[in-house]
């Protein structure tokens, strides 16, 4: 199956290894990944910060670049949420019927990485091995915009040697919130510190999520506090091959 | 003098002060965790919660879509029931109307039921300025008032205080306002509730005028519904001679039947109870029962403007349950005061700016940004207000205002970002520039930089710059040639990195409402215009599935869950059960309403006296009361009294400390909707679910405040 990768601007610039990992996992499963080089950014930052006009231009660009593909994958739940829900609201607010039609089409083609694997490709074991204690942070947009269920956990459960640790208040926000993290930095980091404390108290060595933005924020805090904690995107863990054939 | 939020700082400035208070953080965390757990458990109990939310949303949309007509219908019906209706366009008009009504009674004290709307119009300050003392009677409001404090939560205004702080406050301040707290008062919530009962008892009994809000109004019957726990509301609604209710115009529902879904949703969402202890329904004036003068003041104060915004108007569906506050991770960290608004938390962040015209002041303009858009609020909201969408919508209004009013640093940074993001070539170049930056030095420097970068770095290291972006990796290993450099000015990138994020500035304010002319005419006219231009979409409410269990069994089990005593008897065995109940409480003087079945009265023990019909406050001298009921509800363990034969006036089931209610099996229905169908609209109703109680101290339910502290339900099976 040919799958177009929407890598997101943040992953592109700051966490390219997560993007590479998505490519590796999908190719290991026998799929062809293409990267439409005309892509830039879904416009989430502009949209969520109130820059509707700018976001609208980026939304139209996104639709133009991606509407020709039958399957699109992105490593970011919040960017997928922006396209599927944010664009719909934007199209309604600005009465842009063309954008609305574009979003409708993307609703059937755009998937967050774990959704694509579990719901579309029907794979829960990608042949990975990662002998570490891992905590999973379900990002807010994965839970409450995309309504992801336990797809990431199913995938993690089949990683050889991986021990999944449960932490307190798992579903509460990490405090990132886009420009909130800077406009209201004190509140943002207070939330972050609670999250990091819960995760380290649970004994995790690695904190995993399906949103690089949350991980940049949490990883920055862990680094500042010199915590023995690494952040990794789900794809980066799944890319650690155990060398045996994946179970389809 | 009552404090107000007038001199509050904008959220980004205010929040750090509250974040730095470990006691406050602990109090909030404890209280919100308690209430979230209770709410989740009780919501899970209802199989049809989702369809109830949709039904509530549809009813509210329908009502908002024809608000003008409904208000006119409500006005007619309240007046037909002996009430007077006033319209107030803004806070100042509402204050004037209410102060004049109170002054006309020649009193210098009023008792108040907890009401966010009176806080919205800053009524207490206006009353004080007119020489009238407002006495807050809700436990949490009393705590706020005694502490010269401000409310920090919609349902539990003193949620920021713990039991120890409340004990200290009672000991220090109660004496200044009336009966002092007893020496040796401990911090046990039940002792604190008892101290509040004693402190306020005499105020209730002598009050001539009461002021309330309302949770719902019903157009077709002119009914007001007031939901509470402690019995202070019932005291205010039944004992004084004059009642003034201030209610926002958005609170009207079309029909009596519409109340059902909201009563089912509200308590579960608000306090995590099947039903709050008391719900009072009344329409205008009821001869021989309760206040004989009733004034309804309908408040616009920005609501019709809000209704004119097709996205923003959904905030008017709010039923003030505060579920969104209790799950909000931002609220949990900073508390309500940081929002600088009477309505705090997620709903405050979308309602306050709209009522206040968003960009007119810096506190309001900062509120839509006081959220991570995590969506926890939307997930619990019983009327499905899409708060994250509203926040984004209001952010756009602030930003568009900033863009119009001249150069703005954040806008410039966002424009610079657009230069980069509008072209993959420029993005590739920016990424290469970024990778080439001296990462280590920048990391060390960042915490001292101004603007966004410095804010990020207060507690977070910058991410290490990767050797190459994904894009460049792809083009080297998989794809075409690397993107060629284009004419990106490096200053654009630096501008992006260093730009100070904006703080919304003071802007020209919206012109004040025109004060002349007829307020009623203006509000109804505006709404009529709106209706023509922008109908609110509405769906057809779905029918509710009925619970399957035996109604009587469920009813008795759920009454018992409120710590009420439950006795099942045969038809001839009521009198001995009543006698035993009276013996348990040691009641000496027992009150019975006219028309109560004589066969139910005990043949031995204390004598039962029929209500002598004197002023209601005189009923205080009775220790117990026995009454029949109109209908009982299994799902919530509720008995409903409607003042018909064998039940008497409302004060009868309120003032004596022990209440005995006799229910027959054929009166028990499955749920609230069936109960409403059996009740006659327009009657004075009291819905009782357990003894009076409060959750105002650390969100722990404590039994026994102003209403009867002991409830016996005797069921004839
Ligand atoms: S917005 Fe919804 S959850 Fe929040 S107080 Fe209003 S009704 Fe309750």
Image: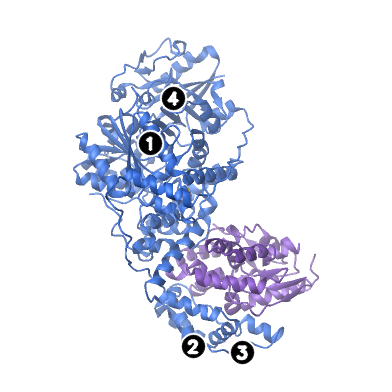
> Considering the image in quadrants, where does the C terminus of chain A appear?
bottom right
* Spatial separation of the CA atoms under disc 1 and disc 4: 23 Å
Identify the disc placed on residue B484.
3
Name which residue lies at 38% across and 56% down. Answer: B24
* Spatial separation of the CA atoms under disc 4 and disc 3: 81 Å
Identify the disc placed on residue B642.
4
Disc 1 and disc 3 in contact, CB within 8 angstroms: no
Counting residues from the start of the chain, the first of labels 1 and 3 encountered is 1
Dot in front, 1 or 3? 1
* Spatial separation of the CA atoms under disc 2 and disc 4: 76 Å
Question: Where residue B129 sits: x, y (%)?
Answer: 20, 47
Counting residues from the start of the chain, the first of labels 2 and 1 encountered is 1
| The chain coloured blue in the image | B
Q: Badge 2 sits on which subunit?
A: B
Q: Nearer the viewer, residue B596 or B121?
A: B121
Q: Badge 1 sits on which subunit?
A: B
Compared to residue B329, the image places residue A227 above or below, namely: below
Name which residue lies at 29% across and 57% down. Answer: B6
| The chain coloured purple in the image | A
Question: Is circle 3 on the same chain as circle 2?
Answer: yes
Q: Is label 3 within 8 A of ligand 1 (CB to nearest ligand atom)?
A: no
Dot in front, 2 or 1? 1
């Amino acid at each position: 199956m040919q799958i177009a990768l929407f890598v997101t601007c943040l992953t592109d610039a700051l966490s390219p290894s997560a993007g590479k990992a998505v490519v590796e996992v999908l190719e290991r499963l026998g799929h062809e990944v293409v990267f439409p080089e005309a892509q830039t950014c879904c416009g989430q930052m502009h949209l969520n910060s109130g820059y509707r006009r700018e976001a609208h231009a980026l939304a139209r660009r996104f639709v133009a670049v991606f509407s020709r593909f039958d399957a699109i994958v992105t490593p970011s739940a919040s960017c997928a949420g922006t396209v599927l829900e944010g664009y719909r609201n934007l199209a309604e607010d600005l009465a842009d019927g063309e954008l609305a039609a574009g979003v409708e089409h993307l609703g059937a083609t755009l998937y967050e990485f774990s959704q694509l694997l579990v719901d579309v490709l029907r794979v829960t074991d990608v042949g990975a091995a990662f002998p570490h204690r891992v905590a999973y942070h379900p990002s807010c947009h994965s839970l409450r915009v995309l309504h992801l269920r336990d797809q990431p956990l199913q995938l993690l459960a089949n990683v050889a040697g991986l021990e999944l640790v449960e932490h307190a208040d798992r579903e509460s926000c990490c405090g990132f919130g886009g420009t909130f993290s800077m406009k209201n930095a004190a509140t943002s980091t207070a939330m972050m510190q609670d999250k990091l404390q819960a995760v380290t108290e649970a004994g995790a060595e690695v904190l995993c999520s399906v949103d690089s933005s949350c991980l940049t924020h949490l990883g920055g805090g862990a680094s500042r506090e010199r915590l023995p904690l690494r952040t990794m995107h789900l794809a980066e863990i799944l890319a650690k091959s155990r060398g045996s054939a994946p179970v389809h | 003098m009552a404090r107000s939020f007038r001199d509050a700082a904008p959220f980004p400035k205010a929040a750090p002060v509250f974040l730095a208070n470990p006691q406050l953080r602990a109090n909030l965390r404890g209280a919100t965790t308690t209430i979230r757990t209770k709410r989740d458990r009780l919501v899970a109990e209802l199989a049809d919660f989702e369809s109830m939310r949709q039904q509530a949303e549809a009813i509210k949309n329908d009502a908002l879509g024809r608000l003008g007509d409904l208000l006119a219908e409500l006005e007619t019906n309240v007046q037909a029931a002996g009430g007077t209706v006033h319209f107030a366009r803004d806070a100042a008009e509402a204050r004037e109307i209410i102060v004049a009504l109170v002054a006309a009674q020649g009193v210098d004290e009023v008792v108040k039921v907890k009401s966010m709307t009176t806080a919205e119009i800053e009524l207490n300050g206006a009353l004080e300025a007119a020489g009238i003392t407002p006495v807050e009677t809700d436990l949490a409001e009393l705590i706020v008032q005694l502490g010269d404090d401000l409310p920090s939560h919609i349902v539990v205004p003193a949620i920021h205080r713990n039991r120890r702080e409340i004990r200290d406050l009672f000991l220090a301040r109660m004496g200044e306002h009336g009966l002092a707290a007893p020496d040796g008062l401990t911090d046990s919530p039940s002792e604190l509730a008892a101290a509040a009962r004693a402190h306020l008892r005499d105020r209730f009994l002598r009050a001539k005028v009461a002021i309330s809000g309302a949770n719902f109004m019903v157009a077709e019957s002119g009914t007001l519904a007031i939901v509470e726990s402690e019995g202070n509301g019932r005291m205010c609604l039944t004992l004084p001679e004059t009642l003034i209710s201030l209610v926002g115009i958005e609170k009207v529902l079309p029909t009596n039947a519409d109340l059902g879904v909201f009563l089912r949703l509200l308590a579960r969402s608000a306090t995590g109870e099947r039903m709050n202890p008391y719900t009072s329904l009344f329409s205008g004036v009821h001869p021989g029962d309760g206040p004989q003068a009733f004034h309804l003041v309908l408040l616009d104060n920005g609501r019709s403007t809000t209704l004119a915004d097709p996205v923003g108007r959904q905030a008017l569906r709010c039923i003030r349950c505060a579920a969104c506050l209790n799950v909000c991770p931002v609220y949990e960290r900073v508390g309500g005061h940081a929002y600088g608004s009477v309505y705090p938390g997620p709903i405050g962040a979308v309602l306050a700016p709209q009522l206040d015209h968003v960009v007119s002041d810096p506190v309001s303009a900062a509120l839509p940004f006081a959220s991570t858009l995590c969506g926890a609020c939307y997930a619990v909201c019983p009327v499905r207000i899409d708060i994250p969408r509203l926040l984004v919508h209001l952010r756009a209004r602030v930003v568009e205002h900033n863009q119009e009013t001249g150069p703005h640093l954040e806008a410039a940074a966002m424009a610079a970002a657009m230069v980069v993001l509008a072209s993959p070539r420029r993005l590739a170049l920016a990424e290469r520039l970024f990778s080439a930056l001296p990462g280590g030095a920048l990391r060390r420097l960042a915490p001292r930089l101004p603007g966004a970068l410095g804010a990020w770095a207060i507690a977070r290291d910058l991410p290490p710059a990767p050797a190459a972006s994904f894009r460049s990796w792809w083009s080297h290993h998989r794809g075409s040639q690397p993107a060629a450099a284009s004419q990106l000015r490096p200053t654009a990138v630096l501008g992006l990195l260093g730009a100070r994020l904006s703080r919304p500035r003071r802007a020209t304010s919206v012109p004040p409402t025109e004060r002349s002319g007829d307020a009623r005419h203006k509000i109804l006219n505006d709404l009529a215009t709106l209706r023509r231009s922008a109908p609110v979409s509405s769906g057809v409410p779905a029918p509710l599935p009925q619970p399957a269990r035996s109604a009587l069994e469920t009813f008795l089990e759920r009454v018992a869950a409120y710590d009420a005593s439950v006795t099942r008897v045969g038809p001839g065995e009521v009198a001995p059960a009543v006698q035993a109940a009276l013996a348990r409480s040691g009641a000496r003087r027992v009150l019975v309403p006219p028309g109560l079945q004589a066969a139910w009265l005990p043949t031995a023990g204390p004598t039962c006296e029929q209500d002598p019909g004197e002023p209601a406050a005189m009923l205080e001298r009775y220790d117990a009361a026995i009454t029949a009921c109109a209908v009982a509800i299994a799902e919530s363990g509720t008995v409903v009294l409607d003042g018909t034969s064998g039940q008497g006036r409302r004060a009868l089931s309120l003032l004596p400390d022990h209440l005995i209610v006799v229910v027959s099996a054929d009166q028990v229905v499955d749920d609230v909707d069936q109960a409403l169908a059996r009740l006659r609209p327009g009657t004075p109703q009291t819905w009782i679910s357990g003894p009076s109680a409060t959750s105002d101290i650390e969100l722990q339910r404590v039994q026994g405040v102003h209403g009867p502290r002991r409830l016996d339900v005797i069921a004839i099976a």
